[in-house]
Image: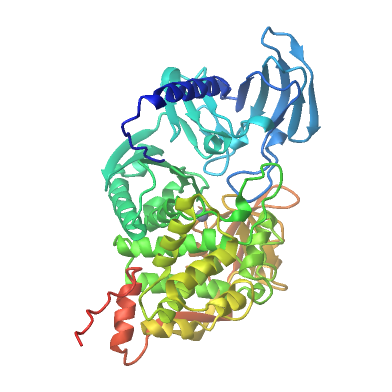
Amino acid sequence: MRHSTLTAVPARQILRFVLLMGMALARSSAATNYTISLANPQQHLLEVQILLPEGAAQRQLQLPVWNALYQVRDFAQYVNWVRAKDRSGHPLAVRALDTSRWQVADAQGGAVVEYQIFADSPAPFGTQFNSHHAFLNLAEVLMYPVDARNQPMVVRFSQVPGGWQVATPLTSMPEGRFSAENYDRLVDSPIEIGGFQESDFDEGGGHYRVIVDAESGDYDMEKIAAMLHKIVAAATSWMEDRPFDSYMFLYHFPRGPAGGGMEHSYSTAISVNADVLARAPDVLASVTAHEFFHLWNVKRIRPKTLEPVDYSHENYTRALWFSEGCTSTAADFIRLRGGLLEERPFEHELASGIAELEHRPAHLTQSAEESSLDAWLEGEAYYRRPERSISYYNKGELLGITLDLAVREASHGQASLREVFQWMNQNYAKKDRFFPDSDGVREAAEAVSHADLGWFFAKYVSGTEEIPWNDFFRSVGLRLIEGTTTVADAGFTASRNFDGPMAVTAVTTSSEAEGAGLQVGDTVLEINGKTAGQESSQEMARLNPGDTITVKIRARRGGERELKWKVGSRDEISYELRDMDNITREQRTRRAGWLKGEAEVLQATQPR
Ligand SMILES: [Zn+2]
Protein backbone atom coordinates (compact mmCIF):
# COMPACT_ATOMS: atom_id res chain seq x y z
CA MET A 1 0.00 0.00 0.00
CA ARG A 2 1.33 3.40 -0.87
CA HIS A 3 0.55 6.77 0.64
CA SER A 4 -0.06 9.70 -1.68
CA THR A 5 0.58 13.15 -0.32
CA LEU A 6 -1.91 15.90 -1.10
CA THR A 7 -0.41 19.10 -2.46
CA ALA A 8 -2.04 22.28 -3.80
CA VAL A 9 -3.28 21.77 -7.35
CA PRO A 10 -2.83 24.70 -9.79
CA ALA A 11 -6.16 25.79 -11.37
CA ARG A 12 -5.04 24.81 -14.88
CA GLN A 13 -4.66 21.26 -13.80
CA ILE A 14 -8.07 20.92 -12.26
CA LEU A 15 -9.83 20.20 -15.54
CA ARG A 16 -7.27 17.53 -16.32
CA PHE A 17 -7.78 16.11 -12.84
CA VAL A 18 -11.55 15.95 -13.39
CA LEU A 19 -11.03 14.24 -16.73
CA LEU A 20 -8.72 11.70 -15.14
CA MET A 21 -11.31 11.06 -12.44
CA GLY A 22 -13.85 10.45 -15.15
CA MET A 23 -11.56 7.92 -16.78
CA ALA A 24 -10.97 6.20 -13.49
CA LEU A 25 -14.72 5.87 -12.96
CA ALA A 26 -15.20 4.54 -16.47
CA ARG A 27 -12.47 2.02 -15.80
CA SER A 28 -13.98 0.87 -12.53
CA SER A 29 -17.32 0.29 -14.23
CA ALA A 30 -15.36 -1.93 -16.65
CA ALA A 31 -14.31 -4.14 -13.76
CA THR A 32 -14.86 -7.87 -13.91
CA ASN A 33 -17.56 -8.68 -11.34
CA TYR A 34 -17.72 -12.02 -9.56
CA THR A 35 -20.54 -13.39 -7.44
CA ILE A 36 -19.85 -16.56 -5.44
CA SER A 37 -22.94 -18.36 -4.17
CA LEU A 38 -22.69 -20.24 -0.87
CA ALA A 39 -26.04 -22.00 -1.25
CA ASN A 40 -24.79 -25.58 -1.12
CA PRO A 41 -22.36 -26.30 1.76
CA GLN A 42 -23.48 -29.92 2.24
CA GLN A 43 -22.20 -30.90 -1.20
CA HIS A 44 -19.23 -28.50 -1.11
CA LEU A 45 -20.45 -26.82 -4.27
CA LEU A 46 -19.74 -23.17 -5.07
CA GLU A 47 -21.54 -21.46 -7.91
CA VAL A 48 -19.69 -18.63 -9.56
CA GLN A 49 -21.11 -15.93 -11.81
CA ILE A 50 -18.75 -13.67 -13.76
CA LEU A 51 -20.05 -10.44 -15.31
CA LEU A 52 -17.74 -9.61 -18.19
CA PRO A 53 -17.88 -5.98 -19.34
CA GLU A 54 -18.21 -5.07 -23.03
CA GLY A 55 -15.14 -5.87 -25.06
CA ALA A 56 -13.91 -8.18 -27.77
CA ALA A 57 -16.34 -10.68 -29.28
CA GLN A 58 -14.20 -13.71 -28.38
CA ARG A 59 -13.30 -13.80 -24.68
CA GLN A 60 -11.08 -16.40 -23.03
CA LEU A 61 -11.34 -17.44 -19.39
CA GLN A 62 -8.53 -19.24 -17.56
CA LEU A 63 -8.70 -21.14 -14.28
CA PRO A 64 -5.19 -21.39 -12.74
CA VAL A 65 -3.58 -24.85 -12.73
CA TRP A 66 -1.52 -24.01 -9.62
CA ASN A 67 -1.69 -21.75 -6.60
CA ALA A 68 -0.58 -21.68 -2.95
CA LEU A 69 1.92 -24.51 -3.54
CA TYR A 70 4.54 -24.80 -6.28
CA GLN A 71 2.63 -27.79 -7.63
CA VAL A 72 0.27 -28.23 -10.55
CA ARG A 73 -3.05 -29.30 -9.04
CA ASP A 74 -5.36 -28.65 -12.02
CA PHE A 75 -8.23 -27.01 -10.16
CA ALA A 76 -10.31 -27.37 -13.34
CA GLN A 77 -10.87 -31.02 -12.36
CA TYR A 78 -13.50 -29.65 -9.92
CA VAL A 79 -15.44 -27.58 -12.47
CA ASN A 80 -18.70 -29.48 -13.09
CA TRP A 81 -20.08 -27.31 -15.87
CA VAL A 82 -19.65 -23.93 -17.56
CA ARG A 83 -22.26 -21.88 -19.42
CA ALA A 84 -22.64 -18.33 -20.70
CA LYS A 85 -25.32 -15.91 -21.82
CA ASP A 86 -25.49 -12.33 -23.05
CA ARG A 87 -26.90 -9.43 -21.06
CA SER A 88 -30.43 -10.19 -22.24
CA GLY A 89 -30.22 -13.83 -21.31
CA HIS A 90 -29.58 -15.44 -24.70
CA PRO A 91 -27.18 -18.39 -24.45
CA LEU A 92 -23.67 -17.86 -25.80
CA ALA A 93 -21.46 -20.66 -27.11
CA VAL A 94 -18.73 -21.82 -24.68
CA ARG A 95 -15.87 -23.86 -26.08
CA ALA A 96 -13.18 -25.56 -23.97
CA LEU A 97 -9.73 -24.78 -25.44
CA ASP A 98 -7.81 -27.02 -23.04
CA THR A 99 -8.50 -28.48 -19.61
CA SER A 100 -8.35 -25.08 -17.89
CA ARG A 101 -9.31 -22.51 -20.53
CA TRP A 102 -12.68 -21.68 -22.07
CA GLN A 103 -13.70 -19.36 -24.92
CA VAL A 104 -16.98 -17.46 -25.01
CA ALA A 105 -18.28 -16.28 -28.41
CA ASP A 106 -20.28 -13.14 -29.29
CA ALA A 107 -19.44 -11.45 -25.99
CA GLN A 108 -18.85 -7.95 -27.45
CA GLY A 109 -21.84 -6.57 -25.54
CA GLY A 110 -20.65 -8.17 -22.29
CA ALA A 111 -21.43 -11.65 -21.00
CA VAL A 112 -22.57 -13.57 -17.96
CA VAL A 113 -20.46 -16.70 -17.41
CA GLU A 114 -21.57 -19.22 -14.80
CA TYR A 115 -20.01 -22.41 -13.51
CA GLN A 116 -20.16 -24.80 -10.59
CA ILE A 117 -17.02 -25.88 -8.73
CA PHE A 118 -16.46 -28.44 -5.96
CA ALA A 119 -14.35 -27.30 -2.97
CA ASP A 120 -13.35 -29.56 -0.11
CA SER A 121 -9.62 -29.18 0.47
CA PRO A 122 -8.54 -27.60 3.77
CA ALA A 123 -6.66 -24.39 4.53
CA PRO A 124 -4.14 -22.97 4.05
CA PHE A 125 -3.30 -24.52 0.65
CA GLY A 126 -6.76 -25.56 -0.44
CA THR A 127 -10.26 -24.19 -0.76
CA GLN A 128 -12.94 -25.60 1.49
CA PHE A 129 -16.67 -25.09 1.67
CA ASN A 130 -18.73 -27.07 4.17
CA SER A 131 -21.43 -26.50 6.75
CA HIS A 132 -18.82 -25.19 9.21
CA HIS A 133 -17.18 -22.50 7.07
CA ALA A 134 -15.77 -21.45 3.74
CA PHE A 135 -12.05 -20.86 3.32
CA LEU A 136 -11.17 -19.62 -0.14
CA ASN A 137 -7.93 -19.32 -2.07
CA LEU A 138 -9.61 -17.45 -4.92
CA ALA A 139 -7.15 -18.61 -7.60
CA GLU A 140 -8.54 -22.10 -7.03
CA VAL A 141 -12.09 -20.90 -7.64
CA LEU A 142 -12.16 -17.89 -9.97
CA MET A 143 -11.42 -17.97 -13.69
CA TYR A 144 -9.95 -14.75 -15.02
CA PRO A 145 -10.61 -13.06 -18.37
CA VAL A 146 -7.29 -13.50 -20.18
CA ASP A 147 -7.54 -10.02 -21.77
CA ALA A 148 -8.42 -8.28 -18.47
CA ARG A 149 -6.22 -9.91 -15.83
CA ASN A 150 -4.68 -6.52 -15.00
CA GLN A 151 -8.03 -4.72 -14.76
CA PRO A 152 -9.97 -4.08 -11.52
CA MET A 153 -11.92 -6.97 -10.02
CA VAL A 154 -14.91 -6.95 -7.69
CA VAL A 155 -16.20 -9.96 -5.75
CA ARG A 156 -19.30 -10.48 -3.62
CA PHE A 157 -20.91 -13.45 -1.90
CA SER A 158 -24.54 -14.49 -2.11
CA GLN A 159 -26.71 -16.85 -0.07
CA VAL A 160 -24.24 -16.69 2.83
CA PRO A 161 -25.52 -18.97 5.65
CA GLY A 162 -27.01 -17.08 8.62
CA GLY A 163 -24.53 -15.88 11.26
CA TRP A 164 -21.51 -16.19 8.99
CA GLN A 165 -19.11 -13.24 8.64
CA VAL A 166 -16.48 -12.47 6.03
CA ALA A 167 -12.81 -11.87 6.90
CA THR A 168 -10.36 -10.89 4.17
CA PRO A 169 -7.54 -8.40 3.60
CA LEU A 170 -9.34 -7.24 0.42
CA THR A 171 -10.63 -3.66 0.27
CA SER A 172 -14.21 -3.53 1.48
CA MET A 173 -16.83 -1.68 -0.64
CA PRO A 174 -20.53 -0.89 -0.07
CA GLU A 175 -23.10 -3.70 -0.32
CA GLY A 176 -20.75 -6.41 0.92
CA ARG A 177 -18.50 -6.19 -2.10
CA PHE A 178 -14.70 -6.44 -2.07
CA SER A 179 -12.39 -5.01 -4.67
CA ALA A 180 -8.85 -5.47 -5.95
CA GLU A 181 -6.82 -3.54 -8.49
CA ASN A 182 -6.26 -6.66 -10.58
CA TYR A 183 -6.57 -10.44 -10.55
CA ASP A 184 -3.14 -11.05 -8.99
CA ARG A 185 -4.04 -8.90 -5.98
CA LEU A 186 -7.51 -10.46 -5.78
CA VAL A 187 -6.14 -13.98 -5.52
CA ASP A 188 -3.36 -12.92 -3.11
CA SER A 189 -6.13 -12.41 -0.54
CA PRO A 190 -7.49 -15.44 1.33
CA ILE A 191 -11.09 -15.33 2.53
CA GLU A 192 -12.62 -16.90 5.62
CA ILE A 193 -16.42 -16.93 5.90
CA GLY A 194 -18.00 -18.41 9.00
CA GLY A 195 -18.32 -17.99 12.76
CA PHE A 196 -14.68 -17.18 13.57
CA GLN A 197 -13.30 -15.22 16.54
CA GLU A 198 -11.60 -11.93 15.89
CA SER A 199 -9.12 -9.75 17.75
CA ASP A 200 -6.94 -6.83 16.71
CA PHE A 201 -4.07 -4.70 17.92
CA ASP A 202 -1.79 -1.86 16.86
CA GLU A 203 1.96 -2.01 16.91
CA GLY A 204 4.43 0.57 15.64
CA GLY A 205 1.77 2.36 13.60
CA GLY A 206 0.49 -0.79 11.89
CA HIS A 207 -2.94 -2.30 12.45
CA TYR A 208 -3.17 -6.07 12.84
CA ARG A 209 -6.27 -8.27 12.70
CA VAL A 210 -6.28 -11.80 14.09
CA ILE A 211 -8.93 -14.24 12.85
CA VAL A 212 -9.20 -17.66 14.50
CA ASP A 213 -11.40 -20.50 13.34
CA ALA A 214 -11.13 -23.23 16.01
CA GLU A 215 -12.84 -24.71 19.06
CA SER A 216 -12.76 -21.98 21.71
CA GLY A 217 -11.10 -24.26 24.29
CA ASP A 218 -8.22 -25.12 21.96
CA TYR A 219 -6.43 -21.78 22.00
CA ASP A 220 -5.86 -18.62 24.03
CA MET A 221 -6.39 -15.45 21.99
CA GLU A 222 -4.45 -13.32 24.47
CA LYS A 223 -1.40 -15.57 24.26
CA ILE A 224 -1.56 -15.50 20.48
CA ALA A 225 -1.83 -11.71 20.40
CA ALA A 226 1.12 -11.39 22.82
CA MET A 227 3.23 -13.61 20.56
CA LEU A 228 2.18 -11.63 17.46
CA HIS A 229 3.15 -8.32 19.11
CA LYS A 230 6.67 -9.67 19.58
CA ILE A 231 6.93 -11.05 16.05
CA VAL A 232 5.71 -7.95 14.21
CA ALA A 233 7.80 -5.60 16.38
CA ALA A 234 10.94 -7.70 15.89
CA ALA A 235 10.40 -8.13 12.13
CA THR A 236 9.59 -4.50 11.30
CA SER A 237 12.55 -3.27 13.39
CA TRP A 238 14.85 -5.83 11.74
CA MET A 239 13.80 -4.61 8.29
CA GLU A 240 13.37 -0.97 9.41
CA ASP A 241 10.28 -1.02 7.24
CA ARG A 242 6.52 -1.58 7.38
CA PRO A 243 5.19 -1.62 3.82
CA PHE A 244 1.51 -1.86 4.81
CA ASP A 245 -1.05 -0.10 7.00
CA SER A 246 -2.99 -3.21 7.92
CA TYR A 247 -2.16 -6.92 8.03
CA MET A 248 -4.27 -10.00 8.81
CA PHE A 249 -3.35 -13.28 10.55
CA LEU A 250 -5.85 -16.01 9.67
CA TYR A 251 -5.56 -19.14 11.82
CA HIS A 252 -7.18 -22.56 11.74
CA PHE A 253 -6.49 -25.03 14.57
CA PRO A 254 -8.29 -28.18 13.43
CA ARG A 255 -8.44 -31.31 15.58
CA GLY A 256 -7.50 -33.41 12.54
CA PRO A 257 -4.39 -33.40 10.38
CA ALA A 258 -3.09 -29.94 9.58
CA GLY A 259 0.11 -28.08 9.19
CA GLY A 260 1.34 -25.24 7.13
CA GLY A 261 1.22 -21.59 6.37
CA MET A 262 0.62 -19.61 3.23
CA GLU A 263 2.08 -16.18 2.70
CA HIS A 264 0.30 -13.21 1.15
CA SER A 265 1.22 -9.55 0.72
CA TYR A 266 -1.18 -8.28 3.40
CA SER A 267 -2.03 -11.47 5.28
CA THR A 268 -1.15 -15.04 6.03
CA ALA A 269 -3.27 -18.18 6.46
CA ILE A 270 -1.86 -20.71 8.92
CA SER A 271 -3.11 -24.11 10.11
CA VAL A 272 -1.75 -25.94 13.12
CA ASN A 273 -3.27 -29.08 14.61
CA ALA A 274 -4.96 -28.26 17.95
CA ASP A 275 -2.98 -30.98 19.77
CA VAL A 276 0.33 -29.68 18.44
CA LEU A 277 -0.66 -26.15 19.48
CA ALA A 278 -1.30 -27.34 23.02
CA ARG A 279 1.83 -29.49 23.34
CA ALA A 280 4.32 -27.45 21.28
CA PRO A 281 3.16 -23.82 21.09
CA ASP A 282 6.58 -22.82 19.67
CA VAL A 283 5.46 -24.33 16.38
CA LEU A 284 2.96 -21.49 15.99
CA ALA A 285 5.59 -18.78 16.56
CA SER A 286 7.96 -20.46 14.14
CA VAL A 287 5.42 -20.77 11.30
CA THR A 288 4.03 -17.30 11.96
CA ALA A 289 7.46 -15.59 11.91
CA HIS A 290 8.24 -17.36 8.63
CA GLU A 291 4.95 -16.40 6.94
CA PHE A 292 5.08 -12.82 8.24
CA PHE A 293 8.61 -12.30 6.90
CA HIS A 294 7.37 -13.49 3.49
CA LEU A 295 5.52 -10.17 3.17
CA TRP A 296 9.00 -8.89 2.28
CA ASN A 297 10.83 -11.94 0.99
CA VAL A 298 8.95 -13.43 -2.00
CA LYS A 299 5.94 -11.07 -1.95
CA ARG A 300 7.90 -7.80 -2.38
CA ILE A 301 11.54 -8.91 -2.66
CA ARG A 302 10.51 -11.09 -5.56
CA PRO A 303 12.54 -13.24 -7.96
CA LYS A 304 12.25 -12.35 -11.65
CA THR A 305 11.43 -15.96 -12.51
CA LEU A 306 8.12 -15.78 -10.62
CA GLU A 307 6.91 -12.71 -12.54
CA PRO A 308 4.55 -12.38 -14.18
CA VAL A 309 2.90 -15.41 -12.60
CA ASP A 310 2.04 -17.99 -15.24
CA TYR A 311 -1.20 -19.51 -13.98
CA SER A 312 -1.40 -21.97 -16.86
CA HIS A 313 1.97 -23.74 -16.39
CA GLU A 314 4.71 -24.42 -13.87
CA ASN A 315 6.74 -21.28 -12.95
CA TYR A 316 10.30 -22.56 -12.82
CA THR A 317 12.60 -20.72 -10.45
CA ARG A 318 16.04 -21.41 -8.96
CA ALA A 319 15.42 -18.93 -6.15
CA LEU A 320 13.34 -20.88 -3.61
CA TRP A 321 16.43 -21.70 -1.52
CA PHE A 322 16.46 -17.93 -0.86
CA SER A 323 12.75 -17.07 -1.06
CA GLU A 324 11.76 -19.96 1.24
CA GLY A 325 14.93 -21.14 2.99
CA CYS A 326 16.35 -17.73 3.88
CA THR A 327 12.85 -16.70 4.98
CA SER A 328 13.27 -19.38 7.66
CA THR A 329 16.70 -17.93 8.54
CA ALA A 330 15.14 -14.47 8.91
CA ALA A 331 12.37 -16.03 11.03
CA ASP A 332 15.08 -17.45 13.33
CA PHE A 333 16.54 -13.97 13.85
CA ILE A 334 13.06 -12.50 14.35
CA ARG A 335 12.27 -15.09 17.04
CA LEU A 336 15.66 -14.48 18.70
CA ARG A 337 15.09 -10.70 18.70
CA GLY A 338 11.52 -11.10 19.93
CA GLY A 339 12.54 -13.31 22.84
CA LEU A 340 10.66 -16.28 21.34
CA LEU A 341 13.83 -18.35 20.85
CA GLU A 342 16.83 -18.70 23.16
CA GLU A 343 20.43 -19.25 22.14
CA ARG A 344 20.78 -22.94 23.03
CA PRO A 345 17.50 -24.10 21.43
CA PHE A 346 18.48 -22.03 18.36
CA GLU A 347 21.84 -23.81 18.12
CA HIS A 348 20.10 -27.12 18.71
CA GLU A 349 17.69 -26.39 15.84
CA LEU A 350 20.64 -25.54 13.59
CA ALA A 351 22.40 -28.81 14.46
CA SER A 352 19.19 -30.74 13.69
CA GLY A 353 18.96 -28.92 10.36
CA ILE A 354 22.55 -29.85 9.56
CA ALA A 355 21.80 -33.48 10.45
CA GLU A 356 18.73 -33.45 8.19
CA LEU A 357 20.83 -32.24 5.25
CA GLU A 358 23.86 -34.45 5.90
CA HIS A 359 21.69 -37.56 6.32
CA ARG A 360 20.23 -37.12 2.84
CA PRO A 361 22.63 -38.66 0.32
CA ALA A 362 21.16 -36.32 -2.33
CA HIS A 363 22.98 -33.34 -0.76
CA LEU A 364 25.94 -34.44 -2.91
CA THR A 365 23.93 -34.71 -6.13
CA GLN A 366 21.19 -32.05 -6.03
CA SER A 367 22.07 -28.37 -5.53
CA ALA A 368 19.96 -25.85 -3.67
CA GLU A 369 19.09 -24.25 -7.03
CA GLU A 370 18.07 -27.60 -8.55
CA SER A 371 15.96 -28.39 -5.50
CA SER A 372 14.17 -25.07 -6.10
CA LEU A 373 13.64 -25.86 -9.76
CA ASP A 374 12.30 -29.32 -8.88
CA ALA A 375 9.79 -27.99 -6.32
CA TRP A 376 7.13 -29.02 -8.82
CA LEU A 377 7.97 -32.69 -8.17
CA GLU A 378 7.43 -32.52 -4.41
CA GLY A 379 3.99 -34.06 -4.69
CA GLU A 380 5.64 -37.33 -5.77
CA ALA A 381 6.62 -39.71 -2.95
CA TYR A 382 9.59 -41.15 -4.88
CA TYR A 383 11.00 -37.68 -5.43
CA ARG A 384 10.93 -37.03 -1.67
CA ARG A 385 13.28 -39.98 -0.95
CA PRO A 386 16.57 -38.98 0.72
CA GLU A 387 18.59 -40.42 -2.20
CA ARG A 388 16.67 -38.34 -4.71
CA SER A 389 16.22 -34.85 -3.29
CA ILE A 390 17.10 -32.33 -0.65
CA SER A 391 14.75 -29.67 0.70
CA TYR A 392 15.28 -26.05 -0.37
CA TYR A 393 13.73 -25.10 2.98
CA ASN A 394 16.33 -27.09 4.91
CA LYS A 395 19.44 -26.28 2.86
CA GLY A 396 18.19 -22.77 2.13
CA GLU A 397 17.84 -21.97 5.83
CA LEU A 398 21.40 -23.23 6.42
CA LEU A 399 22.65 -21.23 3.42
CA GLY A 400 21.04 -18.17 5.05
CA ILE A 401 22.96 -18.92 8.24
CA THR A 402 26.28 -19.50 6.45
CA LEU A 403 25.83 -16.55 4.05
CA ASP A 404 25.16 -14.35 7.08
CA LEU A 405 28.40 -15.58 8.70
CA ALA A 406 30.33 -15.15 5.41
CA VAL A 407 29.07 -11.57 5.01
CA ARG A 408 30.05 -10.81 8.64
CA GLU A 409 33.51 -12.26 8.06
CA ALA A 410 34.05 -10.40 4.76
CA SER A 411 32.83 -7.10 6.21
CA HIS A 412 34.69 -7.49 9.53
CA GLY A 413 31.37 -7.61 11.36
CA GLN A 414 29.95 -4.48 9.75
CA ALA A 415 27.24 -6.23 7.71
CA SER A 416 25.03 -9.30 8.02
CA LEU A 417 22.06 -11.02 6.39
CA ARG A 418 19.94 -8.16 7.74
CA GLU A 419 21.82 -5.67 5.51
CA VAL A 420 21.47 -8.09 2.56
CA PHE A 421 17.68 -8.11 2.98
CA GLN A 422 17.51 -4.36 3.57
CA TRP A 423 19.64 -3.76 0.45
CA MET A 424 17.34 -5.97 -1.64
CA ASN A 425 14.31 -4.24 -0.16
CA GLN A 426 15.67 -0.80 -1.13
CA ASN A 427 17.08 -1.73 -4.51
CA TYR A 428 14.42 -4.15 -5.74
CA ALA A 429 11.17 -4.09 -3.75
CA LYS A 430 10.98 -0.31 -3.26
CA LYS A 431 11.83 0.26 -6.92
CA ASP A 432 9.25 -2.25 -8.18
CA ARG A 433 12.02 -4.37 -9.67
CA PHE A 434 12.41 -8.14 -9.47
CA PHE A 435 15.79 -9.66 -8.57
CA PRO A 436 17.62 -12.03 -10.92
CA ASP A 437 17.47 -15.10 -8.63
CA SER A 438 20.77 -16.19 -7.03
CA ASP A 439 22.71 -13.52 -8.97
CA GLY A 440 20.58 -10.87 -7.30
CA VAL A 441 21.29 -12.29 -3.84
CA ARG A 442 25.02 -12.40 -4.64
CA GLU A 443 24.88 -8.80 -5.88
CA ALA A 444 23.32 -7.68 -2.57
CA ALA A 445 25.70 -9.72 -0.39
CA GLU A 446 28.71 -8.31 -2.25
CA ALA A 447 27.36 -4.76 -2.11
CA VAL A 448 26.99 -4.81 1.68
CA SER A 449 30.24 -6.70 2.38
CA HIS A 450 32.42 -5.05 -0.33
CA ALA A 451 33.87 -8.46 -1.10
CA ASP A 452 33.74 -11.12 -3.81
CA LEU A 453 31.42 -13.88 -2.61
CA GLY A 454 31.30 -15.77 -5.91
CA TRP A 455 32.94 -18.78 -4.25
CA PHE A 456 30.01 -19.15 -1.83
CA PHE A 457 27.41 -19.24 -4.59
CA ALA A 458 29.47 -21.50 -6.89
CA LYS A 459 30.21 -24.08 -4.20
CA TYR A 460 27.05 -24.19 -2.10
CA VAL A 461 24.18 -22.57 -4.02
CA SER A 462 24.61 -23.80 -7.60
CA GLY A 463 27.13 -26.45 -6.53
CA THR A 464 26.92 -29.49 -4.27
CA GLU A 465 30.17 -29.21 -2.31
CA GLU A 466 30.08 -30.29 1.32
CA ILE A 467 29.63 -27.24 3.50
CA PRO A 468 32.67 -26.91 5.82
CA TRP A 469 30.49 -25.96 8.79
CA ASN A 470 33.30 -25.17 11.20
CA ASP A 471 34.86 -22.66 8.78
CA PHE A 472 31.68 -20.64 9.21
CA PHE A 473 30.83 -21.23 12.87
CA ARG A 474 34.39 -20.54 14.08
CA SER A 475 33.82 -16.77 13.76
CA VAL A 476 31.11 -16.91 16.45
CA GLY A 477 33.10 -19.26 18.66
CA LEU A 478 31.12 -22.40 17.92
CA ARG A 479 32.17 -25.75 16.54
CA LEU A 480 30.14 -28.59 15.14
CA ILE A 481 30.79 -31.85 16.97
CA GLU A 482 30.14 -35.04 15.03
CA GLY A 483 29.50 -38.17 16.98
CA THR A 484 28.04 -41.61 16.44
CA THR A 485 24.85 -42.38 18.22
CA THR A 486 22.89 -45.56 18.32
CA VAL A 487 19.41 -44.52 17.38
CA ALA A 488 16.10 -46.29 17.25
CA ASP A 489 15.33 -47.53 13.75
CA ALA A 490 11.71 -48.30 13.00
CA GLY A 491 12.70 -49.83 9.66
CA PHE A 492 10.91 -47.42 7.37
CA THR A 493 10.86 -43.83 6.16
CA ALA A 494 7.73 -41.88 5.42
CA SER A 495 7.11 -38.37 4.15
CA ARG A 496 4.25 -36.10 3.26
CA ASN A 497 3.57 -33.43 0.68
CA PHE A 498 2.98 -30.33 2.84
CA ASP A 499 -0.32 -31.05 4.61
CA GLY A 500 -1.03 -34.17 2.54
CA PRO A 501 -1.20 -37.76 3.80
CA MET A 502 1.98 -39.46 5.03
CA ALA A 503 3.28 -42.04 2.57
CA VAL A 504 5.79 -44.82 3.23
CA THR A 505 8.73 -44.11 0.90
CA ALA A 506 11.13 -46.91 1.93
CA VAL A 507 11.05 -50.11 4.03
CA THR A 508 14.38 -51.61 5.16
CA THR A 509 14.98 -55.09 3.72
CA SER A 510 14.57 -57.89 6.30
CA SER A 511 13.52 -55.40 8.99
CA GLU A 512 10.75 -56.07 11.49
CA ALA A 513 8.70 -53.44 9.66
CA GLU A 514 8.92 -55.50 6.48
CA GLY A 515 8.08 -58.63 8.44
CA ALA A 516 4.99 -56.94 9.87
CA GLY A 517 3.77 -56.31 6.32
CA LEU A 518 4.54 -52.60 5.82
CA GLN A 519 5.00 -51.71 2.16
CA VAL A 520 6.22 -48.72 0.15
CA GLY A 521 3.18 -46.68 -0.87
CA ASP A 522 1.13 -47.47 2.24
CA THR A 523 -0.45 -44.41 3.86
CA VAL A 524 0.44 -43.90 7.52
CA LEU A 525 -2.67 -42.80 9.43
CA GLU A 526 -1.47 -43.04 13.04
CA ILE A 527 1.78 -43.71 14.87
CA ASN A 528 1.31 -44.98 18.44
CA GLY A 529 -2.27 -43.70 18.47
CA LYS A 530 -1.38 -40.17 17.30
CA THR A 531 -2.53 -38.83 13.95
CA ALA A 532 0.36 -38.81 11.49
CA GLY A 533 1.44 -35.29 10.62
CA GLN A 534 3.44 -32.32 11.85
CA GLU A 535 4.55 -34.01 15.08
CA SER A 536 5.34 -37.48 13.78
CA SER A 537 9.09 -36.91 13.60
CA GLN A 538 9.09 -35.98 17.31
CA GLU A 539 6.96 -39.04 18.01
CA MET A 540 9.51 -41.20 16.15
CA ALA A 541 12.38 -39.49 18.00
CA ARG A 542 10.90 -40.61 21.32
CA LEU A 543 11.23 -44.28 20.35
CA ASN A 544 13.92 -46.47 21.90
CA PRO A 545 15.38 -49.65 20.47
CA GLY A 546 13.25 -52.55 21.69
CA ASP A 547 10.03 -50.48 21.99
CA THR A 548 6.95 -51.70 20.22
CA ILE A 549 5.65 -49.36 17.56
CA THR A 550 2.01 -49.43 16.49
CA VAL A 551 1.30 -48.02 13.06
CA LYS A 552 -2.17 -47.70 11.61
CA ILE A 553 -2.02 -47.72 7.84
CA ARG A 554 -4.21 -47.67 4.79
CA ALA A 555 -2.58 -50.35 2.71
CA ARG A 556 -1.75 -49.62 -0.91
CA ARG A 557 -3.98 -52.53 -1.77
CA GLY A 558 -6.79 -53.05 0.70
CA GLY A 559 -8.19 -51.31 3.69
CA GLU A 560 -7.01 -49.98 7.02
CA ARG A 561 -4.84 -52.19 9.21
CA GLU A 562 -2.91 -51.87 12.43
CA LEU A 563 0.65 -53.18 12.34
CA LYS A 564 2.92 -53.74 15.35
CA TRP A 565 6.59 -54.55 15.47
CA LYS A 566 9.70 -54.18 17.57
CA VAL A 567 11.89 -51.14 16.92
CA GLY A 568 15.47 -51.97 15.93
CA SER A 569 18.60 -49.84 16.10
CA ARG A 570 21.37 -48.46 13.90
CA ASP A 571 24.36 -46.18 14.22
CA GLU A 572 23.98 -42.68 12.91
CA ILE A 573 26.21 -39.61 12.76
CA SER A 574 24.89 -36.99 15.15
CA TYR A 575 25.65 -33.28 15.23
CA GLU A 576 25.89 -30.79 18.01
CA LEU A 577 27.00 -27.13 18.13
CA ARG A 578 29.22 -26.40 21.13
CA ASP A 579 31.27 -23.50 22.38
CA MET A 580 34.91 -23.57 21.31
CA ASP A 581 37.52 -23.61 24.05
CA ASN A 582 39.06 -20.21 24.77
CA ILE A 583 36.62 -17.98 22.91
CA THR A 584 38.23 -14.69 21.94
CA ARG A 585 36.72 -11.27 22.50
CA GLU A 586 36.16 -10.89 18.74
CA GLN A 587 34.25 -14.17 18.65
CA ARG A 588 32.17 -13.12 21.64
CA THR A 589 31.30 -9.77 20.04
CA ARG A 590 30.44 -11.49 16.75
CA ARG A 591 28.26 -14.03 18.59
CA ALA A 592 26.36 -11.26 20.40
CA GLY A 593 25.57 -9.52 17.08
CA TRP A 594 24.70 -12.84 15.44
CA LEU A 595 22.15 -13.75 18.12
CA LYS A 596 20.34 -10.47 17.48
CA GLY A 597 20.69 -10.76 13.72
CA GLU A 598 22.57 -7.46 13.78
CA ALA A 599 25.91 -6.21 12.53
CA GLU A 600 28.43 -5.34 15.21
CA VAL A 601 28.31 -1.86 16.66
CA LEU A 602 31.12 0.26 15.22
CA GLN A 603 33.71 1.10 17.85
CA ALA A 604 34.14 4.86 18.19
CA THR A 605 37.16 5.82 16.14
CA GLN A 606 40.12 6.98 18.17
CA PRO A 607 41.15 10.58 17.53
CA ARG A 608 44.53 10.66 15.85
ZN1 LIG B 1 7.40 -20.08 3.09
Give whichever of 250, 203 is nearer the camera. Answer: 203
- Horizontal and vertical percent position of residue 563: 63, 59
Q: Which residue shows up at 44% across the image and 66% down it?
A: 420
Q: Residue furthest left?
A: 607
Q: How many marks?
A: 0
Q: How is the image coloured?
A: rainbow
Left or right? Give the position of 219 relative to 550. Answer: left
- Residue visible at 22% across and 79% down in the picture: 604
Q: Residue at x 40, y 77 (%)?
A: 408
* Along the viewing direction, whichever of 69 and 272 lies nearer the viewer: 69
Can you name the residue that lies furthest to the bottom here? 582
User: Quick one: which residue is furthest to the front in this view?
Assistant: 12
Quarter of the figure that contains the C terminus: bottom left
Q: Is residue 146 left or right of residue 353?
A: right
The picture quadrant where one finds residue 527 is bottom right
Between 137 and 87, the one lying in front of the other is: 87
Q: In this rendering, does residue 181 appear at all?
A: yes
Q: Report which quarter residue 183 is drawn in.
A: top right
Please state the horizontal and vertical placement of residue 69, each as a whole percent of the image: 60, 49
Q: Is residue 144 visible?
A: no
Q: Quadrant of the N terminus?
A: top left
Does residue 203 appear to the left or right of 144 in the view shown? Answer: left
Relative to 273, does residue 87 appear above or below in the rendering? above
In this rendered view, identify the residue nearer to me: 556 or 575: 575
Q: Is residue 284 above or below residue 516?
A: above
Q: Position of residue 457 (x, y in %)?
A: 58, 74
Residue 230, position in %: x, y? 29, 54
